Structure formats: C-alpha cells, structure tokens
Image: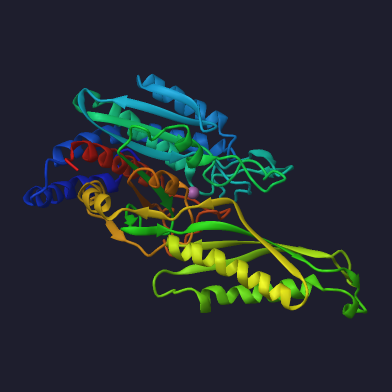
Amino acid sequence: MHSSPTSVALAAGLLTAALSLASTAQAQVLDAAGLQKIDAAIQQLTPKIVTWRRDIHEHPELSGQEVRTAQLVADHLRRLGMDVQTGVGGTGVVGTLKGGLPGKVVALRADMDALPMPENTGLPFASKAKSSYLGKEVPVTHSCGHDAHVAMLMGAAEALAGMKATLPGTVKFIFQPAEEGAPVEPDASGKVPSFGAKAMVEAGVLKDVQAIYGLHITANLPAGTAGYRSGPLMAGSDNIHIHVEGKGGHGSSPWSAVDPIVAASQVVLGLQTVVSRQLNISKEPAVITIGQIQGGTRYNIIPDNVEMMGTLRTFDEDMRQEALKRITTTAESIAAASGAKAKVRFGPVAYPVTTNPAALTEASLPALKLAMGGKAVVIPKVSGSEDFSEFQKVVPGFFYFLGAPPKGKDFTKAPPNHSPQFDIDEDQLPVGARSLAALAVDFLHRSK
Ligand code: NI
C-alpha cells in the first residue's frame, strides 16, 4: 500500500504533466513541486488512511446517526489544530484550516452515512452492525463507499495541515451526514425537516466559501481514473406519490364500484408516455419509474384506493418543471376517465441536478489531471442523484468520480455502489486524497 505501483507511476508522470502545464499561459497554479509536496505527505499517511477506512467500514452508521464517525473526524481535525464545529446540520463536522498567507476560502466535502442493507463482501472488516430503520432492525453497510470518502478527506486534511504556513487562504473540511436520504419519516403533512447537505447549507457552512469540491468512489471506472463532465453530471431526483381514489366493492360486480387497481395500472402505463411522448428528450434524458404499488387486501374485494410511489430523474430544471406538470396531468386525467381520482404530490425529498459549472470545471482540470497522473476522462451522465448539488446551488462546485474497482475485477463487471458485494481497491484511497488536496491548493493559488 505504502509504495503502490500507482504512486510510482504517478511520480514518473508528474513531471511531464507539469511541464505541459507550465508551457501553457496559465496564471500561477498548482505546480509539480506543490503536488510533489502533497504526494509525499499523502504517501506517508496512506497506512493511516487505510486504517481509518477499515475502522469506519466496520462501524457504519445510518443517515443522521453518524455519531461515532463524526467523533472520529472531529478528534482528528482537533489534533491537527483546526477550528472544529460539530453538530452542524445534524451530526455534521466542519474543520477550518487557516493558511499562513491571506487568500480565498475553498471547501472539500465528504459524506459519512451508510445504507440499511446487508454486506456480502467477505472482507475481514465487513460490517456486522445493526440499527433501526423505519421501525425495523436492519443491517447497516457502507455499500456506497462513504467510508472511503471520510478516510480520504481525513488524509487530505492532515496533508494540508502540514503545509499550513505556506497556504494562501483557508480550507474548510466539510464532513456531511445523511447524504443517502431523510433520517426521519415524513410527518402527517408529508414533510421532512432539512437534512444532509441542505441542512449544512442552512447552518451557514458555505457563508464565506468561494468554491467546493467533492468526489464519489466507484468500482465502475478504471482504477485511478477520475470521471467528470462539465454541465449536468448527475440527475435531479423527485419522489412521486400518487393516491388513486376509487370506490370499493365486490370483485364479482365491478360495475357498482370504481376500481382503483385498474385505474392505477393505467396510470403506471400512461406515465411511460411522459418521457417517451411528452418531454423533449433531444435536450436531456429523463427517467420515470414507479417502484411501489399498494392496494387491496383480498382477491375478490375491489379496494377503495391504491398508493403508488416512484421517482423522477431529470438533468435540466425546465424539463423537471415540465415533467412534474405532465405527471400530474397524465395521472389525474387517466384516473378521471374511469371515475377515479388521482392526487399527485412530490417530495418530501427533491435533490437538484448535480451540475459542474463550465468555468470552474475548465479552471480545475489542469490540477485534477496533474493529481491523477493524466488519468481523467469525460464520462456519460449518471442517472443517480447526489445532494452535493445542494452545495452547488449556493457556490460553484466541482464533483467527480474516482475509479477504484477491487483488484483483479473488471471495472465493467464489478458490483456497483449499493450492491451487497460493493468493494473498492484501497490503493486508490491515496489517489483520491491527493486529488482533493491538489484541487484545494490549486484553487487557492488561482486568480479565478
Ligand atoms: Ni454515495
């Protein structure tokens, strides 16, 4: 781990990359010497980063319950001499590193929560943790790799704290809870209190920040490769809830009832025409999925009503607004055709589109490429969602993926995030930590 082939290859590639960077007319940015300093620090820290990741992996915590993880992070940041705030937007932790020289403020973000599902990786440090979710006892697992995010950012924090004296500005380390979803059930009016990134923004975490960077680890990109794109990267997500109200009766005489099961079935099919016939998908793609239908108690009883839940994924705010309208009209009209009534509502959770602004993307790319030893590729849009988008609503933010398929596994076939078999290559942890630190230093050195 300590002297992995990746870091050796990277060191060799550094000079070439740096030379080509120096030959462009860039303003004073991260140079090879700067990156080598970061790289040396991260290499020293690699055994610790791996130990943190394994410890957090073995002790995963659900959204909003990240007490142990937050404590670990806060203790670490305090030991580094940072000004540390805890309990930010729930269990969030923010460490502020003031450099020795005046300058801008940049933030780096890691999410801390795990998922309510079993782990089936066979790792010696696999999770045996259990917790309570929606009133049931569930296994808890870091199957989205947020354990790696926390460990990498703790590493980046220690590396940057070591070069504090020469740092021109301030770096804020944001450890965010509840990225995966609302920690509580909606109240009677269908609402939930703010959580995750949104709650941290509301707590003022970005008040003095000029840009924010974050990454997501994935097993489905080549090892040590950053995947990014300018503009929309990940979908905005809206929960769809449809209540179809009919009139119950005997299954043998449907004419004297209003059957909400048949109406709901027609609504499900009708909703497929929203994307395929009603939205201009030559602009951006969109997805509508109904994932849950509940209605009825017995084979020969027509129930009074049916409940449906689904998700809308969009990459453009106008298209999102259009889709929300069309879903409502389509569901209401189809239900009305059979005398039933559809009531449509969205939320309580809606994640905006994760969008990398063109200017910040372009300005950050040389440093990202330098830190990745040239391995940064443009990837297709991702229909998953990410609440990093809440930060991007407030300040320019750049989000990218870090390829880390388990050793010996083809990245196209490796179990994806949220799979019980999801696993990563720990040799990529220092690569991720280095890229985060490099992006922050580069931003502070840049004139724009
Ligand atoms: Ni995730």
Residue located 17% across and 47% down the image: 14
Q: Whole-percent x and y of residue 432?
A: 34, 44
- Tell whether 77 sits left or right of 188: left
Q: In which quarter of the image is the N terminus?
A: top left
Quarter of image, res 173: top left
Q: Which of 243 and 409 is in front in this view?
A: 243
> Of 251 and 138, which appears nearest the observer?
251
Residue closest to the eye, 347 or 422: 347
Q: State which quarter of the image contains the C terminus.
A: top left
Q: In this view, does 429 lie above or below 78?
A: below
Q: Quick check: can you spot residue 396?
A: yes
Nearer the observer, 215 or 338:
338
Q: Position of residue 353 (x, y in %)?
A: 44, 56
Q: In this view, does 218 lie to the left or right of 422?
A: left
Count all numbered tags in the image, as a single digit. Answer: 0
Picture quarter containing residue 240?
A: bottom right
Name the residue rendered at 89%, 67% in the picture. Answer: 298
* Residue 233 placement (x, y as % from top left): 39, 58
Task: State the image quarter where residue 243 is shown.
Answer: bottom right
Residue 317, placed above or below residue 26: below
How is colour applied across the structure in the image?
rainbow
Q: Where is residue 387 shown, x and y percent of the image?
A: 47, 47
Q: Could you tell whether 119 is left or right of 167 in the image?
A: right
Q: Residue at x 44, y 46 (%)?
A: 390
Whether residue 221 appears in this view of the structure is: no
For residue 313, above or below residue 130: below
